[in-house]
Image (cartoon, rainbow, N blue to C red):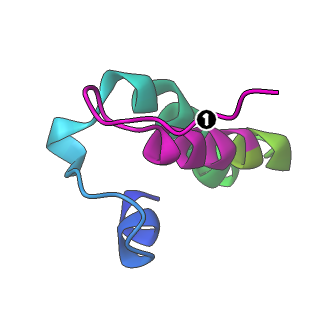
Amino acid sequence: MHASIRKDDRVRWVIQDLPEAAEEPYVYMAAYLAAPDFGQQADQTWFLWGEREINALIRTPRSGEPVRTEYF
């Protein structure tokens, strides 16, 4: 799972240096991929949720970087 995300150049971290905020999404995505190996039914929402969370994490600006806002 990590290799497929790295292949798309979406993440710069290695699996041994996983950010804390990415741990739970990784578990859900891995559970989806591993479920058939354990004779369990995989729920695609696990993978989609994990992917959505990872994407939100990598779009979040790093601390100290300016954040654009609009005022109405």
User: Looking at the image, is 6 positioned above or below residue 38?
Assistant: below
User: Looking at the image, is 21 positioned above or below residue 38?
Assistant: above
Residue 54 coordinates in the image, percent (x, y):
53, 44
Which quadrant of the figure has residue 6?
bottom left
Taking the image as shown, residue 2 lies to the left or right of residue 34, namely left
Residue 21 coordinates in the image, percent (x, y):
42, 24
The question of residue 4 being in magenta is answered with: no
User: Looking at the image, is 25 positioned above or below residue 42?
Assistant: above
Residue 12 coordinates in the image, percent (x, y):
25, 58
Element marked by disc 1: helix
User: Looking at the image, is 72 positioned above or below residue 1?
Assistant: above
How many labels, in total? 1
The question of residue 64 being in magenta is answered with: yes
Q: Amino acid at mark 1?
A: Tyr
Whether residue 39 is visible: no
Taking the image as shown, residue 41 lies to the left or right of residue 25, namely right
What residue is rendered at 51% in x and 33% in y?
Answer: 27
Which quadrant of the figure has residue 63?
top left
What residue is rendered at 40% in x and 38% in y?
Answer: 61
Which quadrant of the figure has residue 49?
top right
Residue 57 coordinates in the image, percent (x, y):
49, 38
Whether residue 40 is visible: yes
What residue is rendered at 57% in x and 49% in y?
Answer: 55
Q: Residues within 10 Å of mark 1 (few under 14, many from 20)?
A: many
Most distant residue in the bottom direction:
7
* Quadrant for the C terminus in the image: top right
Q: Which residues are magenta?
A: 49-72
Taking the image as shown, residue 41 lies to the left or right of residue 62, namely right
Mark 1 — residue? 28
What residue is rendered at 67% in x and 45% in y?
Answer: 52
